[in-house]
Amino acid sequence: MGYNFACDNLFNRNFIMVLASIITIGDELLTGQTIDTNSAWMAEELNKIGVWVKRRVAVGDVWDDIWNALDEESKIADIILITGGLGPTADDITKPLLCKYFGGNLIVNEQVLRHVKYLFEKVFRRPGPILERNLKQAEVPDVCTVLMNERGTAPGMWFEKEKKVFVSLPGVPHEMKGLMKKEVLTRLQRRFKMPFILHQTLLTYGMGESFLAEKIKDWEEQLPGHIKLAYLPHYGNVRLRLTGISDDKNKLEKELEEQSKKLKPLIRDWLVIDDDMTIQQVVAKILKERKQSVGTAESCTGGYIAHLLTIDPGASSNFKGTVVAYDNKVKEDILNVSAQTINSAGAVSEETVKEMLKGALEKLKSDYAVATSGIMGPDGGTEDKPVGTVWIAVGNNRKIEAQRFNFRFDRVRNIEQTAHTALNMLRKFIENHDSSA
Amino acid sequence: MGYNFACDNLFNRNFIMVLASIITIGDELLTGQTIDTNSAWMAEELNKIGVWVKRRVAVGDVWDDIWNALDEESKIADIILITGGLGPTADDITKPLLCKYFGGNLIVNEQVLRHVKYLFEKVFRRPGPILERNLKQAEVPDVCTVLMNERGTAPGMWFEKEKKVFVSLPGVPHEMKGLMKKEVLTRLQRRFKMPFILHQTLLTYGMGESFLAEKIKDWEEQLPGHIKLAYLPHYGNVRLRLTGISDDKNKLEKELEEQSKKLKPLIRDWLVIDDDMTIQQVVAKILKERKQSVGTAESCTGGYIAHLLTIDPGASSNFKGTVVAYDNKVKEDILNVSAQTINSAGAVSEETVKEMLKGALEKLKSDYAVATSGIMGPDGGTEDKPVGTVWIAVGNNRKIEAQRFNFRFDRVRNIEQTAHTALNMLRKFIENHDSSA
């Protein structure tokens, strides 16, 4: 993992880099109760407008720690984004602290107050009067620009101090995202002159990170200093991401295109698509192009493949449905797997998974199907079929292919790995057996 | 969100707190390509052995940034845990840097070398000779204690400097976790004298964070300084977590027990369970106690409820299976929903979701079932049924209850919220209609 050129390389090329630091506030981030998904999302959005995130810091609900973080991060970054510490049961630390840090006083903002009242009366429809602690959300430092939070009660706050921009946002992801998209990103673009940061991603499957690196070593070494390569391995896929930075967008686009053109023949055998897509998005794209559909018969993956195939919009045009046959009786009753097959070959076997696939094709009436059966752990393994043993079948009414895998992870990872492997098998099957032709 | 007492309160009570800081290294953490799940897991494990995480910092693959982070974090923490920057395609920055920082030389560790060779020859079974870049993983600074990584090629490294402990771990979550559990946590416990940090969690449903806070205000104010309360809202549930710190484990356990006993009557109407469980774990527990089972008929949730019910071990004893009926034909063919119902009332309606539920009970032969149908967005909404409209039914062969919801989130959040709401409805249904009696 990681870029093969240090990020600092980018700074030696006369670009005036706009740097950001993200400070997240909240004890729950330091006790492991909450996984910080905000920072990654914010970093990605900042990247798109040409801002480079230099550091991320998480601190607890502690006055001195927050204060020090503001001091330190403003030394290294132009933009300091702060999330969390603003909820109705929060410590009442962050807002007073920001007020003092920027030298202001807390005042009631009438627009925010109206909005809080509206939310409680019309949207949340809570019984009884609005609580004092909710009304207090309308108090803001008089030295900030208030950013209206349409999705919640805590407003965003924009401060400036010694040419640095500080933006405080609520920690609720849904609210933070709304504010970033509607207010923060456009204001930052107006406030700073940014270079262009562009990415070009190629999704590969079937070759490990280090072997890929070996194959493309010479190509990688000839990359110009303002274009970097990252290896992003994920469940058997490796995404190769080229990142370029320039003041000339058109030129950079062309350069990335050229580099990617040189790279493709070197990784032809493992290239899935030259786009930043997940494997389920690739499958959906192929099916849509062919006006075909898929259904799944899942045992060990417990509906996770169906979930992957339905998280993106528009799934209904190419996904028929799923039978999660966790109980063997369900395999028999709905998928028509014969009791004899299960008894003789076992639920985790080539025979069973193939019969499950046939049942799915018949019952779901899809053009293709995927079937899984395996032992995800931690219990249930035997000497013949240890934990991690999985049978996957893919196919259509003319042909079925099945393969055994031996994963060696924990339960959750085994489920995820099985689902991604199954979707990759399906993709290859469709591409190799063009049954629509 | 956040504790209602500042973390600093804990420090004024004569406990010698052992403080940790977590440094994560890798550009992919600063560009949003990777969500940092490691830090939360590490923090939770450290908490369990009495270590308090004071800060978390993420830096890129940049020499100065890593060096400065080591300097800064060792000023505020006793233990500095470092993840990432060690993979075979990494920048070759982190290991040389650690070597220089602690004043050593890189040498080949024979045990690690044997392990790397073993993995490539026997486990990964890659064709061809082992690459130089993989063999280099066996090089370690001669001033560290090597921690063997059974799950991968990059070893952990334990350094000490000026009474501070620094541990460098690979960034792959599966490998990091193995090393933490097998090596790091027990070594830290031998190395430092820790106080006890204990948590007691109560799961509530149906009341917002600020109203709960209002209800339990007086109780919260009487909490002793070494016990703190956190509100952790999550999809309509709010977890109330008491955290206590003490040198006397038994006394602390008793204190937490007493506080929790005083709290329970105040939140009786919303209390789900006095344990740190997810809603799907609560459902599984109730079903196991009653030796009963559930099945699901899912349209808009696309298998996500089935996924939640199967991510924990032992699911097969109380989960029968699922029909994901994304296509209306599947609703008709497998779940026996009448075409007329779908035509007249619509796929997203009380009538359809109730028929889906009946079909699930019949086909999956489960004691209880859950059914969902809704419009998850971003498209597909109408004036009558805007995006976020969801019908959920729960029931058994004797009784069915259905309810309409109007969520107002994005697609992914709507799916998650529907699934959690459905599981909560099921829990209440089972508790209110004890059909096993």
Image: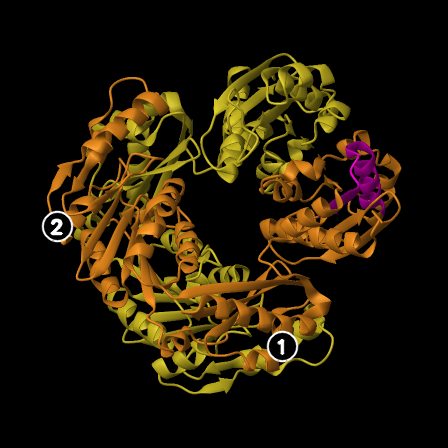
Chain colours: A orange, B yellow
Category of crowding for the residue at label 1, using alpha-carbon neighbours closer than 10 angstroms: few (below 14), some (14–19), many (at least 20): some
**Crowdedness near tag 2: few (<14), some (14–19) or many (≥20) residues, C-alpha within 10 Å:** some
Res. B56 in view? no
Chain for disc number 2: A
Q: Report whether B276 appears left or right of B221.
A: right
- Tell me whether marks 1 and 2 sit on the same chain: yes
The chain to which mark 1 is attached is A
Foreground label between 1 and 2: 1
Residue at horizontal 68%, vertical 74%? A266
Q: Position of residue A352 (x, y in %)?
A: 82, 43
Please determine whether, in this image, residue B351 is positioned above or below residue A35: above
- Residue in the image at 35% along x and 77% along y: A14
Looking at the rendered structure, the secondary structure element under dot 1 is loop
**Image spot of residue A288 (x, y percent):** 70, 44
Residue bearing mark 2: A100
Q: Which region shows up in magenta? A: A351-374
Viewer-side residue, B251 vs A284 = A284
Position of residue B58 in the picture relative to residue B377 (left or right): left
Q: B189 or B128, which lies in front?
A: B128
Relative to A246, is A434 above or below? above
Q: Is residue A367 magenta?
A: yes
Locate residue B422, reporting x and y percent.
53, 27
Q: Secondary structure at mark 2?
A: helix
Residue in front for this viewpoint, A216 or A352: A216
Upstream in the sequence, badge 1 or badge 2? Answer: 2
Residue that appears at 24% across and 49% down: A158
Q: Which mark is residue A216?
A: 1
- Which quarter of the rendering shows the C terminus of chain B? top right
Q: What amino acid type should be assigned to the residue bearing mark 2?
A: Lys
Amino acid type, mark 1:
Ile
